[in-house]
Amino acid sequence: MPRGQVTTTGPDARVAAAAVVAADDLVVARLLPVLDEHGIGLDVYRALRRLSDAPDGLTVGEFGRLISSTPPATTRVVDRLVTEGLAYRRADATDRRRVLVVASDAGRDLWRALVADLDA
């Protein structure tokens, strides 16, 4: 087996599983309390994270793939972001058939606040 590759069985798999469990513990201990302070859930956090990396926006399909979401669930997340004023939809300037999801100023402000709180 090539160096650095992890198998799905045996000792390497147990080490990888332990790392996943440790990462989950970190999320629960560090991230979730910050999200609670801001009144958002993990789904909104993940959405804002992806939108913050795309200042010009993402197509709904791209966005769904990045948040590992089905099309109906992606639509619900986008609807929620738009309703809460954290994002907006706009037509793509180069192809008006495509709809882009873009973080609003409030969404970008919330993302910056989350990052600052997590860095504190």
Image: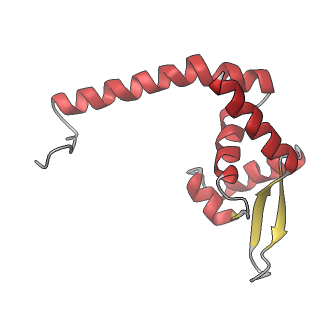
Please give the name of the residue rendered at 75% of the width and 66% of the height, measured from the top-left corner.
100
Whether 87 is drawn above or below 6: the answer is below
Q: Is residue 38 left or right of residue 4?
A: right
Image coords of residue 9 (percent x, y): 18, 35
At a point 80% along the width and 81% down the height, the residue shown is 96
Image quarter of residue 5: top left
Q: Residue 21, how many percent across, how many down? A: 40, 24
Name the residue rendered at 76%, 31% in the picture: 40
Q: Is residue 63 visible?
A: yes
Say if 61 sits above or below 6 in the image.
below
The front one of 101 and 8 is 101
Q: Residue at x 20, y 32 (%)?
A: 12
- Comparing 52 with 92, the one in front is 52
Q: Residue furthest left?
A: 1
x and y percent of residue 10 in the render? 15, 31
Q: Is residue 41 at least partly visible in the picture? A: no
Q: Which corner quadrant of the image does residue 113 belong to? A: top right
Give the total of numbered labels: 0
Using the image as rendered, state which of residue 110 and residue 1 is in the foreground: 110
Relative to 115, residue 99 above or below = below
Rendering quarter of residue 84: top right
Indicate how the structure is coloured in the image: secondary structure
Which quadrant of the figure contains the C terminus? Answer: top right
Viewer-nearest residue: 39 or 77: 39
